[in-house]
Image (cartoon, rainbow, N blue to C red):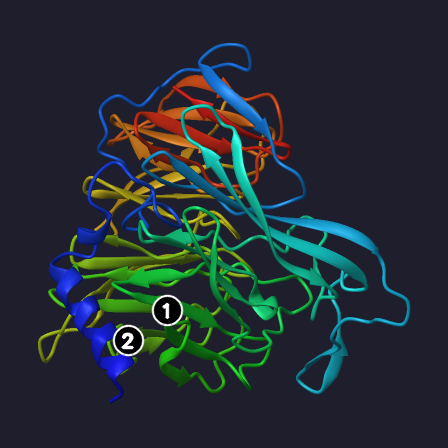
Amino acid sequence: MSQITRRSVCVAIATMASVGALWAGPNWPGWRGADSSGVSDESALPVAWTPTSGIAWKTPIPGRAHSSPIVWGDRIFLTTAIEGDVIPDHTPLKHVIEGSEWRSPDATGGNKRHTFQVLALDAKTGKILWTRTSYEGPVYDDRHSRGSYAAPTPVTDGARVYAYFGSEGLYAYRFDGTPVWNRKLGNVAGLSVGVSTSPVLFGNLVIIQADEDNGDTSFIAAIDGTTGRDVWRVARPKMPISWATPLLTSAGGRPELVTTTDTRIVAYDPRTGRELWSEPGLESYAVPSPVAAGTMVIIATGNPKKITIGLRLGAVPEGQARRVWEYRKGSAYVVSPTAYGDQVYITSDGGITTALDAKTGALIYEGGRPPVASTFMSSPVAYAGHLFMTNEEGDTFVITAGPTHAVVRTNSVGEPVFASPALANGTVYIRGLKHLFAIR
């Protein structure tokens, strides 16, 4: 094992007394927060706002992106993608699925020039402190017409911020905007609708799940955050495309990195890439991200089948099944489940909420409806005894957490929202189609 590998693994082990040890305090360092749950225990977060009240500032953000903001101390980091002109004679990747050429009817953008950027903002004022262009030029594949090339949420360790743009590379910056390193990890065929899997951190390791169309060149890799070099890389043969972000957890008594596809669910040791366990897959597209609930991991899918399953984390005693329960209704194509208290909440694409017991899968309630017809791409956040669900119109429905469903308030930022919120330092950050909003 190289010196770089030994050092990286030692740092990872040292920080793994708890997965969130590196992220102590009121930061929101990556996709759905410190533990990928979307849940905050802060007591001073706002519960009410309108387009004209409760918003501390809003800052125009160029381009189009569905990535969430991340927050560390007084810094906010965002990614964005700016579309340019058509490039003559440039065509995106041709996809071959089961021997036949295929392109999504919603595919777009692959024949144009694009600019991918990372931005840093002052959390107090919303002022853009710096903008760095990570990549500019043609792209490997199309994206969905309702999606973005800046779909993966960046991640930070408090010293550097890491931004992933799929085939166009992984980029590391210091907090002052100084580039540290960048590299292309390999082309990722996104089924002509794009890449959305976000990077996760384990100590000094930046972990990327890169599953593509047919699984012929799928892999998962851990990159040294200081040098940008591979620490480990594991091929995932015949693991077809996944848009879900892996879950890093220690809830089962050991560090586990849980990955999902429609064919297999696999947990790896994040220190080495060694496979710890696997289960049959989701039978449908892996888009929602898994969440931990005690010693369980909850995994959902919503297209074409609607399935939510509860699996045991850690070593399973002989004679016991890892899969504890499953529920076959109510889950969304994009929206991730939320585990809050003893319950897990799943929502349909139209925001109809189902609550299940996280340990047993027992139905607590189903059919909880938003007050108006809605569609959702943003995943919920939870705090102060409530779920906060933001629809594509920018309305946030405040729903009681617990055994009964009640919508107690509707808030709005006044513009469309596709990204999931961030919660940090007494502030709710919502990325709209054109602005980043700070709500206090």
Asked whether the beta carbons under mark 2 and mark 1 sit within 8 Å of each other, the answer is yes
Q: How many marks?
A: 2
Q: SS of the residue at dot 1?
A: strand
Q: Position of residue 226 (x, y in %)?
A: 35, 67
Compared with 97, 21 (above or below) is above
Q: Which mark is residue 259?
A: 1
Determine whether, in the image, residue 269 is placed left or right of residue 423.
left
Q: Residue visible at 13% across and 65% down? A: 14
Viewport quadrant of the N terminus: bottom left
Quarter of the rendering containing residue 187: bottom right
User: Which callout, 2 or 1, points at the residue further toward the start of the chain?
Assistant: 1
Compared with 402, 17 (above or below) is below
Q: Residue furthest right?
A: 88
Determine whether, in the image, residue 44 is placed left or right of residue 100.
left
Q: Position of residue 254 (x, y in %)?
A: 14, 68
Q: Which of 348/1 is in front?
A: 1
Packing grade of label 2 (10 A; few <14, some 14-19, many >=20) is many
Q: Which mark is residue 268?
A: 2
Packing grade of label 1 (10 A; few <14, some 14-19, many >=20) is many
Q: Residue visible at 45% across and 80% down? A: 219
Q: Which mark is residue 199?
A: none
Q: Position of residue 22 (x, y in %)?
A: 21, 53
Q: Which of 358/424 is in front?
A: 424
Q: Amino acid at mark 1?
A: Thr
Determine whether, in the image, residue 141 is placed left or right of residue 348.
right
Q: SS of the residue at dot 2?
A: strand
